[in-house]
């Protein structure tokens, strides 16, 4: 076993630079709205360029205007590409272009956050197989494809990098009042995918972590609550802070996973 080497006063670094994302680009899938666009702002606030990929033809206008204003104020760049995360050819091309642009700006692609995903609430006894397959395709395959191609780019660049997969507490527990077996199964798969690729890719300086969101107010959960309003009361009984989460709550934890790809790891 190698001896543990503690940092000396001459090598120790102050905390602030360790938790910055300067001189790098982070790609975010599902970056067109909701949690994805919030994390886009988080990366910009930490000093990094952002490249968003989403199935939407265009991002949420109001949220994206705020993103562009923030990027301009900091001399950074936030770009948007319409892309289906289940289309490997399209994802590979988009990420290779993002990496090339980043290198040209002196901001190499060093991070990925996979936010793209869907939710369906259907009783398991009535679940159509085609919808089950779509859930796994988007949430599982649509996480693996960008992770795989980012990892290839990180390896080729020799820079290492960090991948944050947005999972869910629903991948580890069953939620009372919700008939979301396919969604829960897909997020359990994301947890195990993370563990598996982390042990494969660590040798290349690539870190992979999951972030498990709880009940947060996004367009997806709002639609669920419209369909089944009584669920909110069930959720609130377990909300220790007396409220549901909001996307801003996840800026810090997602950022910490990205930041730790630097010397803070």
Image (cartoon, grey):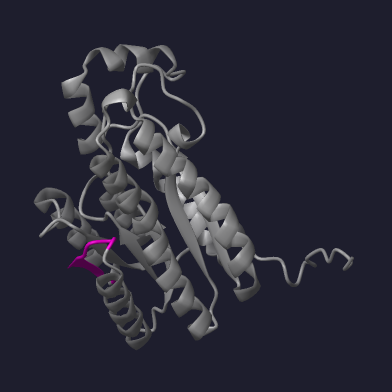
Picture quarter with the C terminus:
bottom right
Q: Quadrant of residue 207?
A: bottom right
Magenta run includes residue 20: no
The residue drawn where x is 36% and y is 37% is 183
Q: Quadrant of residue 42?
A: bottom left
Front residue of 252 and 96: 96
The residue drawn where x is 51% and y is 33% is 172
Magenta run includes residue 85: yes
Does residue 86 sit above or below 35 in this rendering? below
Give the tally of numbered discs: 0
| Picture coordinates of residue 256, whole percent (x, y) | 51, 53
Q: Can the viewer see residue 265? A: no
| Picture coordinates of residue 234, whole percent (x, y) | 36, 13
The residue range painted magenta reads 76-86
Picture quarter with the N terminus:
bottom right
The residue drawn where x is 85% and y is 63% is 4
Does residue 247 sit above or below 28 in this rendering? above
| Picture coordinates of residue 139, whole percent (x, y) | 35, 49
| Picture coordinates of residue 250, whole percent (x, y) | 40, 42
The residue drawn where x is 25% and y is 63% is 53
């Amino acid at each position: 076993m190698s001896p543990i080497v503690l940092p000396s006063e001459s090598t120790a670094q102050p905390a602030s630079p360790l938790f910055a994302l300067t001189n790098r680009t982070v790609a975010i899938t599902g970056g067109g709205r909701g949690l994805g666009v919030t994390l886009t702002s988080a990366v910009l606030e930490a000093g990094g360029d952002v490249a968003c990929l989403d199935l939407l033809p265009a991002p949420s206008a109001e949220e994206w205007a705020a993103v562009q204003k923030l990027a301009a104020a900091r001399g950074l760049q936030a770009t948007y590409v319409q892309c289906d995360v289940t289309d490997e050819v399209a994802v590979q091309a988009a990420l290779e272009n993002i990496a090339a642009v980043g290198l040209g700006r002196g901001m190499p692609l060093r991070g990925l956050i996979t936010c793209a995903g869907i939710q369906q609430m259907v009783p398991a006894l009535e679940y159509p197989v085609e919808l089950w397959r779509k859930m796994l395709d988007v949430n599982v395959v649509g996480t693996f494809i960008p992770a795989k191609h980012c990892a290839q780019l990180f390896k080729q660049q020799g820079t290492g990098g960090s991948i944050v997969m947005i999972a869910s507490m629903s991948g580890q527990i069953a939620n009372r009042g919700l008939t979301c077996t396919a969604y829960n199964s897909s997020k359990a798969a994301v947890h195990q995918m993370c563990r598996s690729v982390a042990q494969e890719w660590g040798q290349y300086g690539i870190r992979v972590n999951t972030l498990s969101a709880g009940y947060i107010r996004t367009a997806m959960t709002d639609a669920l609550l419209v369909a089944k309003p009584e669920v909110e009361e069930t959720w609130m009984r377990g909300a220790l802070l007396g409220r549901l989460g909001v996307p801003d709550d996840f800026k810090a934890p997602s950022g910490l996973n990205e930041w730790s790809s630097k010397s803070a790891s």
